[in-house]
Amino acid sequence: SKPILKSNDYFALLYENGGTRFRVDRQSGNVYTKTMDQAIITGAISSTGVVALVTESDLYSCVLQIFDKNGKKLYTRNCIERLSDIAFNEDSTGCVFTELRAVDGDVTATLKCIQFDTTDYTWESEPLTTLSLALSLTENNHACVIGDTTCAYYDDKGNLESQYDYGGTLENYAVDAGNAAVLIRDEEKRETKLVIFPGSASEPIEIVVNGDAKAVQVYGDRVYMMNAETVIAYNFSGKAVATVRLDSTYDSFLKKDNYLFLLRYDKIDRVDFKE
């Protein structure tokens, strides 16, 4: 089993992928620790401390279980298809999850919305032919799905609103509160594009970037992109608003307050990053 950390500004969820134990922490310390009956496949935690865990099952493809901020079980759903991603609504009273199916050799992703006080679905989307990699909800509960071939947005009733097909290879991606960014490599044109989705795929912002672009992050109203020599911050209009030069080569990065934490296999560096 390998440890997985999911976090937000208020809580952290740590679990073993393929293991049975998980714990919830906040800045003041550990909130609770639990052991599940079956192996954990994936999990998520909301800004109010509600936890969703998907576990293995002897009778079903998997089981979705929801726990309140104190670790009390709120909800259980036995699932006949595999679940890949979970996103909580604004007040943590429900969530949207992605169901994966194999249809005629293609992988499809279907979104389903549930409330934790009822067993019926609130809504269900039409299947999208892509392998879902990330799911996020906007403030008005519209859903963003980043797939391996396409990015799609759904309204709060599960209707497809907008969609962007990459037309190239997905190199990296990030999404935060329904705002998304992807790095796409087009081998035919021999170019790499940063594509920004400001809460919708109807008017994506496309920027041709260095071929060595390797990582992208979305924080608040900014998109940050790393290449071999720099990290560049863009606003949602696609304008570069800040740049920091790198003294070394890194694999990825994280942003916290006015700092960038630069990561590679043998070290972590911190640099100032202010606009």
Image: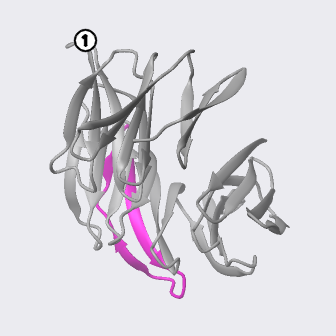
- Rendered location of residue 30, percent (x, y): 82, 65
The stretch drawn in magenta includes residue 119: yes
227 sits to left or right of 84: left
- Rendered location of residue 197, percent (x, y): 27, 47
Task: Tell me which corner region of the image, top left, top right, bottom left or bottom right, holds residue 65.
Answer: bottom right
Q: Please tell me how crowded label 1 is: few (under 14), some (14-19), or many (20+) other residues with Cα within 10 Å.
A: few
Colour approach in the figure: one colour
Q: Give the number of marks.
A: 1
Task: Tell me which corner region of the image, top left, top right, bottom left or bottom right, holds residue 80.
Answer: bottom right
- Rendered location of residue 140, percent (x, y): 32, 72
Q: Which residues are magenta?
A: 104-130
The residue identified by callout 1 is: 190
> In which quadrant will I find the C terminus?
top left
Q: Residue at x 45, y 82 (%)?
A: 120
- Rendered location of residue 69, percent (x, y): 69, 77
Q: Is residue 249 above or below residue 273?
A: above
Q: Is residue 204 above or below residue 6?
A: above
Three-letter code for the amino acid on which mark 1 is drawn: Arg
Comparing 162 with 99, the one in front is: 162
Q: Residue at x 68, y 22 (%)?
A: 265
Q: Residue at x 27, y 52 (%)?
A: 198
The stretch drawn in magenta includes residue 73: no
Comparing 120 with 217, the one in front is: 217
91 sits to left or right of 224: right
Residue 107 makes an appearance in the image: no
Secondary structure beneath dot 1 equals loop
Comparing 9 with 6, the one in front is: 9
158 sits to left or right of 119: left
> In which quadrant will I find the N terminus?
top right
Q: Is residue 212 above or below residue 3?
A: above
